[in-house]
Image (cartoon, rainbow, N blue to C red):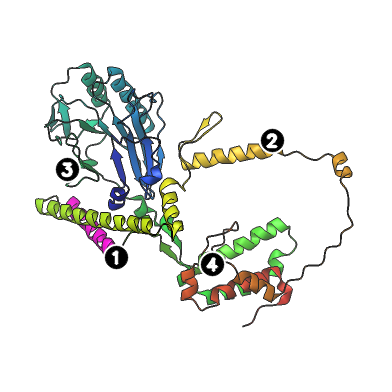
Amino acid sequence: MLLSLLACDFDAVVLTETWLHSGISSAELSSNYVLYRCDRNSLSSHLSRGGGGLIAVKFELNCSSVHLVDCESLEQTAVRIILPRFSLFICSIYIRPNSHVDTYARHVESIHQIQQMANPDDVIVILGDYNLPNLVWTFDDDFNSFLPLNASTEQELALVEPTLSSGLYQINDLLNANGKLLDLTFVNNPDRVSLVDYPSALLKVDDHHKPLALIVNFCSRMEDDSSSRSELDFSRCDYHTVNNKIASLDWDRILDHTSVDNAVSTFYEQLNEIIRETVPLKAQRSRNFNQPWWTPQLRNLRNRLRKARKRFLHDKTPIRRRELHEAEEKYKNLQLESFRKYINALQSTFKQNPTSFWSFVRNRKNLTRIPDKIVYQSSNSDSPLSSANLFAEFFQNMYESNSSQPTRQYIDSLPSYNLRFPVLVFDEDVVHKALSSVDATKGTGPDLIPRSSSRTVQRCSPDQFLWFTTNLCARVFFPRLGSLHR
């Protein structure tokens, strides 16, 4: 699945039956998607194998899980993608064959919960493997969707009647190899969601389930909010202007007659304002290009594949379908070959270079992002932001419970020593030497002032960035030394 998700450009990928379990980390499956999983458990089934649902959402999108009440026994997961003008709700459900009617009723109730959360302009998409093979669906022009002709069993009626009467429309008619329709797609607005018979599947195709693609008409968040995907480009910074702006500031006047805390805040405000004025922005690079087994030829095929996808989605002709299928096969085969060569190289050089091997293992087993779901006392989180707030609450409580003001009696009982500390003297050479030892390839420190990357240092004159930081520190912290001169 790792290679498959790296190969696709879909904003979201939905799998209605995954066979995943707690022994498989989400980091093993994807490095460019946020994964929302609902693996099979003792509440959802007495079987230990099979089932489970997954929704993968691109990191660039603002997404969070949707908490649904009384759904612990369902193999179901739901997410909300927040877009500039509306939200997109996606729900994935797997219901195993011959399930009790109550399972379908609980799922319908969860759909109603999503509808209550959604605003009138929001889009709702429900994708599920319902395992109701005897239902026959026919297209109705008035509803612009498919209606069931023969719903008769308790399970069929429990799903179809309340779902369609609540304002949802079933838009999938892609029969499987046996001529049955097990996977249904319900949407609240069929005019804004179109279904495509996609020529190639991400994973090996099950004869009982036909892969499909959905196109939701919306303006991409990345296009509307380009600043959220931008970063400072120090390689194109005019350092001469930076130095002049810093040199023109009257630090004695700015930092005089104020507390230390206010002085530090004022210092950072002045510096960050200069950075905003002089350092241009650049678009952030895609996370997809960080795989160690990628080659220039593989990147070239990926670009061709992306173009083939766009042409097919714009013009769904047999010729475009065949072009897309051939492009995907070439890309998948070459990526698999490159990945196997990379793994073989890791194995063959394990004794000589064990660091590379364990680095690969850690990347496949660990998640660096903030978890979406954590539990602290009686509170549950459903997004990275709420998780971070719970972590902050935990550490705050720990600090408050372990901290107490010492009594006067305790302070008086402490021994005293008559110590004489030498006066610390710094000059320009000391500051220059300390700054020259800083690793320029590292990220920002606690002060959030960005350091120069190694590429920036290479593109600038040898001591340009070092001169900038030395001049800054000398003028701010040692103003009486005067400005530095080359």
Dot 4 or dot 3: first in sequence order is 3
**Which of the 4 image quarters holds residue 39?**
top left
Q: Which residue is mark 4?
A: 440
Foreground tag (4 vs 3): 4
Q: Which residue is mark 3?
A: 197
**Separation of marks 1 and 4 at Cα, in angstroms:** 28 Å
Q: What residue is at 67 percent from the left and 69 percent from the top?
A: 476
**Residue 401, numbered label:** 2
Q: What residue is at 70 percent from the left and 68 percent from the top?
A: 477
The part of the chain drawn in magenta is 296-315
| Residue 389 relative to residue 337: left or right | right
**Separation of marks 4 and 3 at Cα, in angstroms:** 50 Å
Q: Which residue is mark 1?
A: 296
Disc 2 packing (10 Å; few <14; some 14–19; many ≥20): few
Disc 1 packing (10 Å; few <14; some 14–19; many ≥20): few
Q: Amino acid at mark 3?
A: Asp
Residue 50 is situated, as x and y percent measured from the top left of the image, at 30, 31
Q: Residue furthest front?
A: 351
